[in-house]
């Protein structure tokens, strides 16, 4: 099974090379890495170019960018990977095994950061996902290409909406192998504060609050330089 690894990015110049370097082993095995840039102003595409099979431009928005990557993919399965998330060992074999019985799935996640709450938060995320069949983007969602219908083009919660649609067709494969994602958002805003924010946003989403409004709440008020207080590619 050939994997197409789709990495949506925005202003990730500082860390994109370190993020893509571990994927070079997979490229050597015949899998492809597709980087989709949403309008970076810091030269991210240039840093990514030598470490990806293709780097393309797309309108900004994680769902839009991931769908753009999926359209040019040649693999039998799609793996959507955040730029600040690292895969466990031997992901193609684990994904291929999972997709023999499931149309889609995700990994467990560990959050890397300073807060002592992060292991607890990751455990709760994994448990909730296993119970509900809803995956988050941090958990590296993968799907058979012939089963992929696209991410809903919304400003936030595209992973939740995608999971809900896929769950109606089949439960996900919930792999216990852990991807490791950056805790920069959690450390920057405070782990418990961020957890409460994410739960409020999720509850509001299920109540039908428009995703555009939720995205504004997610970003938070502008900093002194006029930029959103939470770095996000949305």
Image: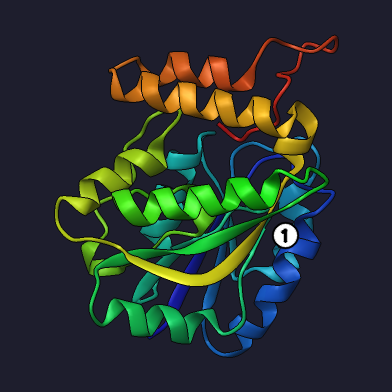
Q: Quadrant of the N terminus?
A: bottom left
Please give left or right for residue 134 compared with residue 213 in the image: left
Q: How many marks?
A: 1
What residue would you read off at disc 1?
48
Residue 69, how many percent across, how many down? Answer: 46, 55
Residue 205, how many percent across, how many down? Answer: 35, 23
Looking at the rendering, which quadrant does residue 70 occupy? bottom left
Residue 118, how many percent across, how many down? Answer: 69, 47
Q: Quadrant of the C terminus?
A: top right
How many residues crowd around disc 1 within 10 Å: few (fewer than 14), some, or many (20 or more)? many
Please give left or right for residue 180 compared with residue 190 in the image: left
- Residue 121 makes an appearance in the image: yes
Q: Is residue 234 above or below residue 15?
A: above
- Residue 8 makes an appearance in the image: no
Q: In the image shown, does 35 or 126 lie closer to the viewer?
A: 126
Please give left or right for residue 27 compared with residue 162 in the image: right
Single out the residue that lies furthest toward the bottom. 29
Q: In the image shown, does 202 or 158 lie closer to the viewer?
A: 202
Q: In the image shown, does 62 or 89 lie closer to the viewer?
A: 89
Q: Secondary structure at mark 1?
A: helix
Q: In the image shown, does 169 or 30 lie closer to the viewer?
A: 169
Seen at 85% across and 9% down, the residue is 224
Q: Is residue 227 above or below residue 93?
A: above
Seen at 70% across and 19% down, the residue is 228
């Amino acid at each position: 099974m050939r994997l197409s690894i789709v990495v949506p990015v925005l202003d990730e110049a500082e860390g994109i090379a370190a993020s893509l370097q571990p994927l070079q082993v997979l490229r050597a095995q015949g899998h492809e890495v597709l980087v989709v840039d949403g309008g970076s102003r810091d030269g991210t595409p240039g840093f990514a170019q030598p470490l990806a099979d293709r780097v393309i431009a797309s309108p900004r928005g994680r769902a839009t960018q991931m769908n753009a990557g999926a359209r040019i993919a040649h693999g039998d399965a799609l793996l959507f990977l955040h730029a600040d998330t690292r895969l466990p060992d031997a992901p193609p074999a684990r994904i291929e095994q999972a997709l023999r019985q499931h149309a889609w799935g995700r990994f467990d996640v560990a959050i890397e950061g300073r807060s002592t709450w992060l292991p607890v938060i990751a455990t709760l995320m994994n448990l909730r996902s296993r119970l509900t069949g809803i995956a988050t983007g941090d958990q590296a969602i993968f799907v058979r290409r012939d089963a992929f219908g696209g991410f809903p083009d919304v400003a936030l919660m595209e992973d939740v909406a995608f999971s809900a649609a896929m769950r109606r067709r089949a439960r996900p494969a919930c792999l216990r192998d852990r991807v490791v994602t950056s805790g920069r958002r959690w450390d920057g805003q405070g782990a418990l504060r961020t957890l409460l924010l994410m739960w409020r946003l999720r509850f509001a989403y299920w109540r039908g609050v428009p995703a555009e409004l939720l995205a504004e709440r997610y970003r938070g008020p502008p900093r002194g330089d006029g930029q959103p207080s939470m770095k996000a590619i949305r």
